[in-house]
Amino acid sequence: MTTRAPDADGPIRVIIVDDEDLSLNLLSAILSDIDGIELVAECNSGQAAVEAVMKYAPDVMFLDIQMPEMNGFDVIAAIQGDVLPLVIFTTAYAEYAVNAFKIQAVDYVLKPLNEDNIAESLARAKALLKVKQVKRSKPEVLEILQDISEQVKSNMAGQKPATLIVKEMDRIALLDPDNIDWIEAAGDYVCIHTGGETRIIRTTLKAIEAELSGPNFQRIHRSTLVNMSKVREVITAPKGEAFIVLADQNQLKVSRTYGAALRARLPKTA
C-alpha cells in the first residue's frame, strides 16, 4: 500500500479527527499557522473521518484514538487500504502512543497539543511523502491491531477492563463493559448485546467471561452471561427456574444450575 505523494510545490492535504471541539479547534488553529498545509476537513466522529478520506484523499490524517462509537483503530479498519493516508495519532493516554507507533503511524502526539510537536510530526510526514514511503498493507495493520489488543488484555489480567477489545471480521472494536446488556453463546460464536445492537464475535463465552473479571457479570445459563447492573426484575418460575427482565425489557431464562448463584447476589427480603 502506498500513500499519494503531493506535488513538489503543492501543499500537504490534511484532515483532523477529534470528538472534542476544543481539541479540534486547537489543532485547526495550529495547522493554520504552518506553511505548506491545506486543511481539507475537520471531523468530529469516526464515521465522518471515513467519509472525508474517501472524498478528499488526504495525505495525512491527525486521528484521535479515544472516540465514542468509532475509535481511532475502528477508523483505520473501515478505510479502504489503497486510500489510507499517513496517520498521526493524537491521544491523552501515553500507553496508546506506543501502540500507535507499532502499527506504523507516522507519529503520535500526546495531548495537550502544542505547536512544536505538531510541526515536528508534519515534518516527518512530509519527508515520508516525498520518498513515497511504502506503508504496511491493511491486513498487516489489522493483524498488528490484534496483537495490540492481546497486549492490552494481558496488562489488564485480573482487573475489570475499561474496555473489552474484540475482533470482528476486519475490524477491532473496543466496547465499554458497562454498556453491555447480555452475552450469548451461539456455537463457535458469541453474540454481545449492547445498546440495542448485537456484535457477533468468533470466540467462546468462557473466554469473554474471563476477560470480564469483576462483580458486574453473572452467568445465568450455560450459554448466557448477563450484566447485573442491567437487571430490573427477577421472576421466579417452577422447578427452581427463573427469568430476569433487563432494562431494555428483554427477558432471559435463568437455569436451575445457575439459579442459586444468582439468588445469592440479590438483596434479601424480609
Image (cartoon, rainbow, N blue to C red):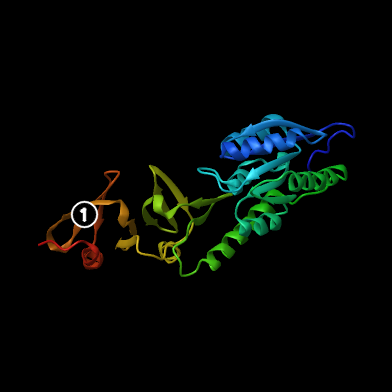
> Which quadrant is the C terminus positioned in?
bottom left
Vertical position of residue 1 compared to residue 99: above or below: above
* Residue 269 horizontal side relative to residue 188, left or right: left
Count of marks, rendered view: 1
Instruction: Report the residue that reaches farthest toward the left.
Output: 270
Instruction: Report the residue that reaches farthest toward the right.
Output: 8
Vertical position of residue 142 compared to residue 40: above or below: below
Which residue occupies 44% across, 63% down?
Answer: 160
* Residue 255 horizontal side relative to residue 174, left or right: left
Q: Position of residue 132 (x, y in %)?
A: 85, 44
Q: Position of residue 192 (x, y in %)?
A: 41, 52
Could one spot residue 146 in this view of the protein? yes
Q: Position of residue 236 (x, y in %)?
A: 15, 57
Label 1 sits on a secondary structure element that is strand
Amino acid carrying label 1: it is Phe
Could one spot residue 1 in this view of the protein? no
Mark 1 crowd level (few <14, some 14–19, many ≥20, 10 Å Cα) = some
Vertical position of residue 91 compared to residue 158: above or below: above
Q: Position of residue 245 (x, y in %)?
A: 24, 49
Quarter residue 130 falls in: top right
Q: Nearer the viewer, residue 206 or 74?
A: 74
User: Which residue corresponds to mark 1?
Assistant: 243
* Residue 26 horizontal side relative to residue 193, left or right: right
Instruction: Report the residue that reaches farthest toward the bottom.
Output: 158
Quarter residue 238 falls in: bottom left
